[in-house]
Image: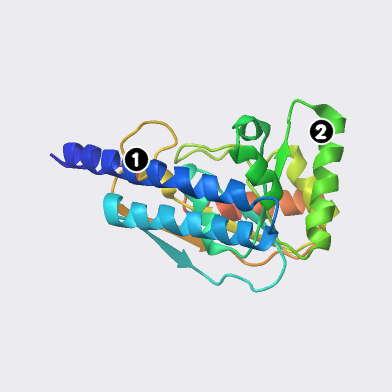
Amino acid sequence: MRTLLALIRTILFAIAFYGGSVPIVIVAFIILPFSEYRLQSMARFWGGYHYACARILLGIRSHVDGTIPPGQVLYAIKHESFFETIELLRIFNRPAVVAKIELSRIPLWSQIARTYGMIFIDRAGGAVALRAMMTEVRRFVAEGRSIVIYPEGTSTPPGEQPPLQAGFAGLYKLAKLPVVPIALDSGHLYPRRGFIKYPGVVTYKFGEIIPAGLPREEIEARVHAAINVLNDPSRNQH
């Protein structure tokens, strides 16, 4: 019965969220050439709309454990599902987000995302792709925006702790920003693969701020440990 109820709620969520996202994307595309500020407001609204749908229809709530820093930082986030990719638009103030190049191939949406502040990276593109990413990072840092990166490179199921991608240390060195590691546990409620989603609480655990300028080995070790403090395979129970 629990699985059946979760399936029904997931179907209602899909209809409400994806159906409601269509007019949001259309409006965002219309205002795209005229106002970057309004586009950023639309992104925040979309994040809020997603959370409202998740809370009302799926029974998923989020809880922040720790303090969101007010200044400009580099957020290093554990990535377990689609949930946090939209949530960060609601939680943070105008973050520029490093994302995989595949997302840049989505028609219409990719143009909006680039203008908003999405930094697409082609991990197979070698040095040229890396330099392009670094140029974008410099621009957004100069504008006073925080940067969001998933240092493991992709979403991982609960219980897995892959090593950080090599590009994280390079971005950390370039940005010269303190790092805020964030652990989360969305994967047991909002699986990265599989359709059905389950009610519960997604926790964002904000770790201790790590200063800029540390050696590569130290920053990687500290971030890896901090983003995995909620990573427990026994939580993946329904």
Kindly check if marks 1 and 2 are in contact, taking CB atoms under 8 A apart as contact.
no
- Which x, y percent locates residue 135? 85, 46
- Say whether residue 10 is left or right of residue 141: left
Q: Position of residue 41 (x, y in %)?
A: 58, 62
Residue drawn at x 21%, y 39% is 8
The answer to whether residue 21 is visible is yes
Q: Residue at x 83, y 54 (%)?
A: 139
Query: Residue 7, position in %: x, y?
Result: 24, 37
Which of 95 and 65 lies nearest the eye of the viewer? Answer: 95
Q: Which residue is mark 1?
A: 14
Q: Is residue 232 visible?
A: no
Q: Residue at x 72, y 67 (%)?
A: 72
Horizontal side, residue 84 vs residue 208: left or right: left
Please tell me whether mark 1 or mark 2 is closer to you in this view.
1
Q: Residue furthest top?
A: 124
Q: Disc 1 residue type?
A: Ala
Asked which secondary structure carries label 1, the reply is helix
Quarter of the figure with the C terminus: top left
Nearer-the-camera pick, 146 or 212: 146
